[in-house]
């Protein structure tokens, strides 16, 4: 890493945080989001209407470059030749492990993260060291809650990072959360999950939330007693649908219209978390990257809304295209089936 460049970029981003949200130069174009299947990790590709791109996490290492190859294929499908930003939510292997292989497969502009590893475990220290080595020579920015990323045509706001979170409500948010009173206190989590970088992406009237693997105590801090996030149109179910996350007061206060679970065949999508999301007020549909083989039929959605139904799969993705009026379409790349959700 180059300390001087890091400092300059950090200054630029901190100044941008105070600016007004950008709007699309061409309202006829759509925001694209690809939920890439990395077998229970995360790799979410966001392409703005102006063609700038941000990848959130990189999947696993190994597997002969499987996850990096799937990310690059999605980038080509989106019509981009480089990743302007790669945002690492936290330093667990299923999120950061694919970085060394990714940088060998596609040009990356700037890496974004929450700073130093904060988990006391050998495996996470190993993965963080591999990440540091892989991004050497790239631009690097450490973000703080409330900051924004300079991606033209959309607003990307950091809600959480390194265990901290926003304290000022997002526009239109801040109402008392009636679901908080019945929720038991959540345990302290000292892992990297609780340090996840969470972002709210806004394109006109469309709002998409990704909190990485943020766990319940941190979710409740940002949603109780007042909901600092507001409502969203699209929700990436936190922590692959694990029941360590997805506190009911937060999920229900979000009122997501559509939710996506980036689970694997045998990872994530726990019945308890699935049910909380499924029952959230106003939810129109739930989509999954995989059929959860260790769950049951009642806690899996219909196959037309599942990208991969077999454990040994081809790694099909879910694609979302969103317009400024809040209308968006979800497409299952396995079947070509699609559904449009109007505001």
Image: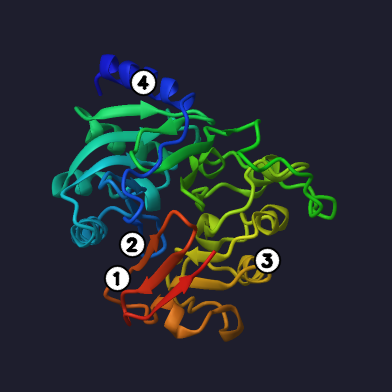
Viewer-side label of 2, 4: 4
**In the figure, 23 relative to 81: above or below?**
above
- The residue at the point 49 percent across, 65 percent down is 261
Instruction: State how far apart marks 4 and 1 are (Cα).
Output: 37 Å
Instruction: State how far apart marks 3 and 1 are (Cα).
Output: 28 Å
Residue 36's disc is 2
The local secondary structure at tag 3 comes to loop
The local secondary structure at tag 4 comes to helix
- The image quadrant where one finds the N terminus is top left
Q: State the residue position of label 1.
A: 315
**Mark 1 and mark 2 in contact (Cβ < 8 Å)?**
yes
**Mark 4 and mark 3 in contact (Cβ < 8 Å)?**
no
**In the figure, 139 relative to 196: above or below?**
above
Crowding around mark 3 (Cα neighbors within 10 Å: few <14, some 14 to 19, many 20+) is: many
**Mark 1 and mark 3 in contact (Cβ < 8 Å)?**
no
Q: Nearer the viewer, residue 166 or 184?
A: 166
Residue 340's disc is none
Where residue 190 appears, as percent x and y from the top left, is 59, 38
Crowding around mark 4 (Cα neighbors within 10 Å: few <14, some 14 to 19, many 20+) is: some
């Amino acid at each position: 890493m180059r300390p001087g460049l890091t400092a300059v970029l950090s200054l630029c981003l901190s100044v941008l945080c105070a600016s007004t949200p950008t709007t699309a130069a061409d309202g006829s174009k759509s925001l694209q989001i690809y939920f890439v299947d990395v077998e229970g990790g995360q790799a979410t590709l966001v392409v703005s209407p102006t063609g700038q791109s941000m990848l959130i996490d990189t999947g696993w290492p190994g597997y002969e470059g499987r996850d990096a190859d799937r990310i690059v294929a999605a980038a080509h499908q989106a019509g981009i030749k480089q990743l302007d930003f790669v945002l690492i939510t936290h330093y667990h292997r299923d999120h950061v492990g694919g970085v060394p292989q990714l940088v060998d497969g596609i040009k990356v502009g700037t890496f974004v993260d929450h700073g130093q590893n904060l988990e006391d475990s050998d495996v996470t220290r190993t993965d963080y060291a591999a990440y540091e080595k892989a991004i050497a020579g790239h631009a690097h920015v450490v973000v703080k809650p409330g900051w924004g990323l300079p991606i033209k045509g959309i607003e990307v706001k950091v809600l959480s990072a390194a265990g901290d979170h926003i304290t000022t409500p997002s526009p239109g948010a801040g109402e008392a959360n009636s679901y908080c009173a019945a929720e038991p206190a959540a345990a302290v989590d000292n892992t990297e999950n609780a340090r996840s970088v969470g972002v709210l992406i806004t394109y006109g009237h469309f709002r998409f939330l990704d909190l990485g693997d943020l766990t319940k105590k941190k979710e409740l801090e940002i949603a109780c007693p007042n909901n600092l996030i507001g409502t969203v149109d699209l929700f990436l179910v936190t922590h692959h649908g694990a029941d360590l996350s997805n506190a009911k007061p937060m999920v229900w206060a979000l009122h997501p219209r559509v939710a996506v679970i980036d689970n694997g065949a045998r990872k994530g999508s726990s019945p308890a978390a699935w049910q909380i999301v499924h029952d959230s007020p106003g939810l129109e549909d739930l989509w999954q990257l995989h059929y959860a083989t260790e769950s049951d039929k009642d806690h899996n959605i219909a196959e037309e809304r599942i990208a991969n139904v077999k454990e040994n799969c081809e790694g099909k993705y879910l694609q979302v295209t969103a317009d400024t009026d809040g209308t968006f379409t979800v497409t299952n790349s396995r079947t070509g089936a699609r559904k449009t959700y109007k505001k």
